[in-house]
Amino acid sequence: MKPKGRHITLDYSGFKGDGDWVLKVLQAAVSRSNAREVHAHVSQFDGSQSPLGFAAVVLIDESHVSAHCYADEGILAVDCFTCGEVNPADIADDIHMQLTGSIPTIKLVQRTKLDRFVMEE
């Protein structure tokens, strides 16, 4: 079976930051890759309808890079999903370096890899 896409997820604890900054981190990682950004957006959640935090996404021609945060718990989930030739691990590594270089309290709790669009050969 041959995958057409790959998905990398990163789960962090000890996150301190805001959605606008994380969106810039995601966009910077995408711009340093061979992926093509199509659209970017962040939504801040004030805790009135959903938990305090944010959701950020960079839509790329090859799929997406996103982050979701529960600010009151200091947890952040990042996912990098690409199809074709773009390697999501490179984007995930870039994001990880930016986060750990800027936030001394952050800790990577889990990293996963999943093949997507698996096709029979």
Image (cartoon, rainbow, N blue to C red):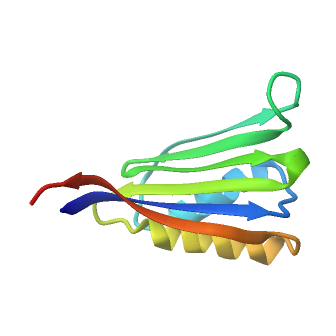
Q: Residue at x 46, y 66 (%)?
A: 113
Which of the 4 quarters of the picture holds residue 27? Answer: bottom right
Total labels: the figure holds 0
Which quadrant does the C terminus fall into? bottom left
Q: Position of residue 112 (x, y in %)?
A: 52, 66
Q: Is residue 49 above or below residue 66?
A: above
Between 75 and 94, the residue placed more toward the observer is: 75
Q: Is residue 111 above or below residue 45?
A: below
Q: Residue at x 36, y 65 (%)?
A: 86
Left or right of 5? Residue 95 is right
Residue 106 visible somewhere in the drawing: yes
Q: Residue at x 80, y 62 (%)?
A: 13
| Extreme residue toward the left, this view | 121
Q: Position of residue 108 (x, y in %)?
A: 71, 71
Q: Is residue 94 above or below residue 117?
A: below
Q: Residue at x 44, y 55 (%)?
A: 81
Q: Position of residue 109 (x, y in %)?
A: 70, 68
Left or right of 1? Residue 69 is right
Which of the 4 quarters of the picture holds residue 54? Answer: top right
Between 1 and 55, the residue placed more toward the observer is: 1
Left or right of 4? Residue 61 is right
Q: Position of residue 40 (x, y in %)?
A: 58, 42
Residue 32 visible somewhere in the drawing: no
